[in-house]
């Protein structure tokens, strides 16, 4: 059975492009444009991996979503790959994981995505 | 807002500008006003002397000479006043020189007249000599310093000559009026007031200039911040659509069905997009560093040797494929600097990247780190194309690329600006030495952090793939 990946990103173009790349690699893809959509998708479908953009509507939406997922009993073991931008490097984004325990995600990938790197990382994590 | 309005309108020395002429003219007018009082004072002295002679208190007094001197001064002042009235505001070439000439003439005459007055009212040891101080103070404000010194010199010389004459030829002396001791009671306060007046005027002017400079500086800093913020926001805004375009090129390749030519064109397009995105990232990084106060970044203790090992490791592949020797010289000491994570690595990566990029095959890039008392010194030296003389000062400027660098490869022109901004933010200095055709040497000096040794997750990594790594710090000869 093909693995299903949830792509969470507020940019529709990036969602579409990522879907094309991933379905080309044989995965089933679900899409979500925000934290709420992601939660409802997670409750309705069996998701095997979450591809999470850190910066969406607000600077910390990605992190908050990851945190919420980790809190949920049913979802806490779903692997998450976070997509970050240069802003984290320059210290602009608050990291709730910094103070306190480290937020457990499986990997951080830098945008722009190299499709080969993405596919390799996904295969590694799944 | 017109920036030039906040720069200084007048300089302290009267310059050739329109402002300078006006200032000079204003000062001259003030001198003229004072001379009315001066001339009147001499006439009063003449009157006093005449009264004393008439009352029999004094044997004789050259009150007629005094009267003549006073009237002469007033007459000259009238002429000067008329000339000044007639001059026009629009700058005529040589007007400043004319004004200076008038000033010199007036002041010189004043000195002569007052020297004579002093002599005629009881000799040079007369408290009225204080007036000379006042006049020379005015001269210092009105004339270029050298001319003021000349006036002072002449006055002093004549004063001494008069004094010598009075001592050697007693008949030359004027009778000392009995009011002489009383005159000291007047003279000393006059001297005190004179000093306060001049010092006050000078200080007031300096304070005003200082205010203007501070205001201009504040404005420039604010403008610089605005520019950085604009740069940061634009870069940020541009990144998102570019990221989307980049993803689409990847998606097209993933969809497949392209003939080789199409594939190749698409690949080239993607590379260009990646170049732009790198450029934007650099611009973003630079403006963020410049814009943010140091507190925004969480600083910790960063071990120098770790950062340099990792930075060098990043470029081994590139150096090897180019045929360039890349070596790291450092001890295994524990020196740490206070910096946010990535700061040191970013600096070193940019410097090493430059060194490798601009060194041709067969050359060497040496990265060395060493302790130097309160600081650590990191040096990146290459045997590459160097920086042309005359472009060394500009090399750290944003987007600047040296002429010989352009021919070698593409680049953002931001690497050194970023490195310098980070180094300065960390409280250090960056120094660049170079000789065209021989190589370049960039030295970064950073203060050692005195915090307790950071509990570093990673122990000191032995980068065993380094060629030529030596475990002892060696002093480099460049």
Image (tube, coloured by chain):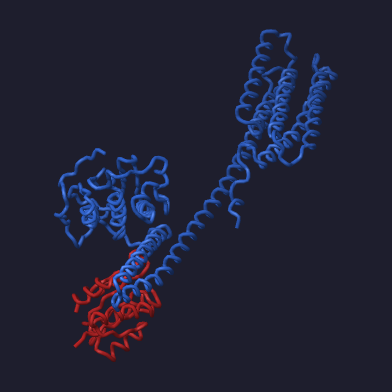
Chain colours: A red, B blue
For this orientation, the residue located farthest to the bottom is A44
Q: Position of residue A2 (x, y in %)?
A: 21, 86
**Figure quadrant of residue B452:** bottom left
Expressed as whole percent of the image width and height from the top left, the position of residue B96 reads 69, 34
Image quarter hosting the N terminus of chain A: bottom left
Expressed as whole percent of the image width and height from the top left, the position of residue B246 reads: 35, 71
Q: Is residue B63 left or right of residue B211?
A: right
* Residue A79 in the image, given as x and y percentages of width and height: 22, 79
Q: Is residue A50 visible?
A: yes
- Residue B335 placement, left or right of B243: left
Q: Which residue: 58% across, 42% down?
A: B206
Return the residue nearer the eye: B241 or B269: B269
Q: Is residue B452 visible?
A: no
Residue at x-position 42% and y-position 57%: B290
Horizontal side of B157 relative to B278 (left or right) equals right
Image: B367 above or below A19: above
Which quadrant holds residue B435? Answer: top left
Location of the C terminus of chain A (image quadrant): bottom left
- Up-down relation of residue A50 to residue B24 (above or below): below
Residue at x 27%, y 55% (from the top left corner): B451
């Amino acid at each position: 059975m093909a693995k299903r990946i949830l792509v969470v990103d507020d940019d529709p173009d990036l969602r579409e492009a990522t879907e094309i790349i991933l379905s080309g690699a044989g995965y089933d893809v679900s899409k979500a444009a925000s934290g709420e959509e992601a939660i409802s998708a997670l409750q309705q479908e069996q998701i095997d991996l979450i591809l999470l953009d850190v910066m969406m509507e607000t600077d910390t939406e990605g992190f908050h979503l990851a945190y919420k997922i980790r809190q949920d009993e049913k979802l806490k073991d779903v692997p998450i790959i976070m997509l970050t931008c240069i802003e984290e490097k320059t210290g602009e984004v608050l990291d709730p994981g910094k103070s306190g325990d480290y937020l457990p995600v499986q990997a951080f990938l830098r945008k722009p995505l190299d499709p080969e790197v993405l596919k390799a990382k996904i295969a590694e994590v799944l | 807002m017109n920036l030039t309005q906040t720069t200084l309108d007048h300089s302290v020395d009267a310059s050739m500008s329109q402002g300078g002429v006006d200032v000079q003219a204003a000062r001259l007018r003030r001198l003229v006003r004072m001379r009315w009082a001066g001339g009147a004072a001499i006439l009063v002295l003449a009157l006093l002397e005449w009264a004393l002679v008439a009352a029999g208190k004094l044997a004789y007094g050259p009150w007629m000479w005094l009267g003549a001197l006073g009237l002469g001064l007033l007459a000259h002042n009238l002429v000067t006043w008329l000339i000044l009235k007639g001059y026009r505001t629009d700058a005529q070439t040589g007007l400043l020189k004319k004004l200076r000439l008038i000033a010199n003439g007036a002041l010189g005459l004043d000195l002569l007249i007052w020297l004579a007055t002093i002599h005629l009212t009881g000799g040079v040891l007369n408290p009225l000599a204080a007036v000379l101080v006042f006049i020379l103070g005015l001269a210092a404000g009105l004339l270029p310093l050298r001319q003021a010194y000349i006036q002072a010199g002449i006055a002093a010389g004549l004063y001494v000559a008069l004094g010598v004459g009075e001592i050697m030829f007693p008949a030359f002396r004027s009778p000392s009026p009995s009011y002489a001791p009383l005159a000291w009671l007047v003279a000393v306060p006059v001297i005190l007031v004179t000093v306060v007046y001049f010092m006050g005027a000078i200080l007031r002017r300096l304070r005003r200039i200082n205010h203007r400079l501070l205001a201009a500086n504040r404005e420039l800093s604010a403008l610089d911040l605005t520019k950085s913020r604009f740069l940061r926001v634009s870069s940020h805004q541009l990144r998102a659509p570019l990221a989307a375009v980049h993803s689409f090129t990847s998606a097209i390749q993933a969809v497949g069905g392209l003939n080789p030519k199409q594939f190749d064109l698409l690949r080239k397009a993607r590379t260009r997009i990646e170049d732009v995105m790198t450029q934007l990232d650099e611009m973003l990084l630079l403006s963020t560093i410049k814009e943010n106060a140091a507190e925004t970044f969480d600083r910790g203790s960063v071990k120098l040797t770790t950062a340099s090992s990792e930075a060098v490791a990043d470029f081994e592949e590139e150096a090897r494929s180019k045929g360039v020797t890349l070596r790291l010289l450092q001890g295994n000491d524990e020196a740490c600097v206070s910096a946010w994570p990535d700061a040191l690595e970013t600096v070193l990566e940019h410097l090493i990247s430059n060194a490798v990029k601009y060194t041709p095959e067969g050359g060497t890039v040496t990265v060395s780190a060493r302790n130097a008392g309160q600081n650590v010194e990191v040096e990146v030296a290459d045997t590459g194309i160097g920086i042309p003389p005359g472009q060394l000062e500009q090399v750290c400027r944003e987007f600047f690329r040296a002429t010989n660098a352009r021919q070698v490869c593409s680049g953002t022109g931001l690497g050194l600006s970023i490195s310098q901004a980070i180094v300065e933010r960390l409280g250090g200095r960056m120094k660049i030495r170079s000789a065209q055709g021989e190589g370049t040497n960039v030295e970064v000096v950073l203060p050692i952090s005195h915090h307790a040794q950071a509990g570093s997750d990673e122990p000191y990594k032995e980068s065993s793939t380094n060629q030529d790594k030596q475990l002892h710090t060696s002093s480099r000869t460049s």
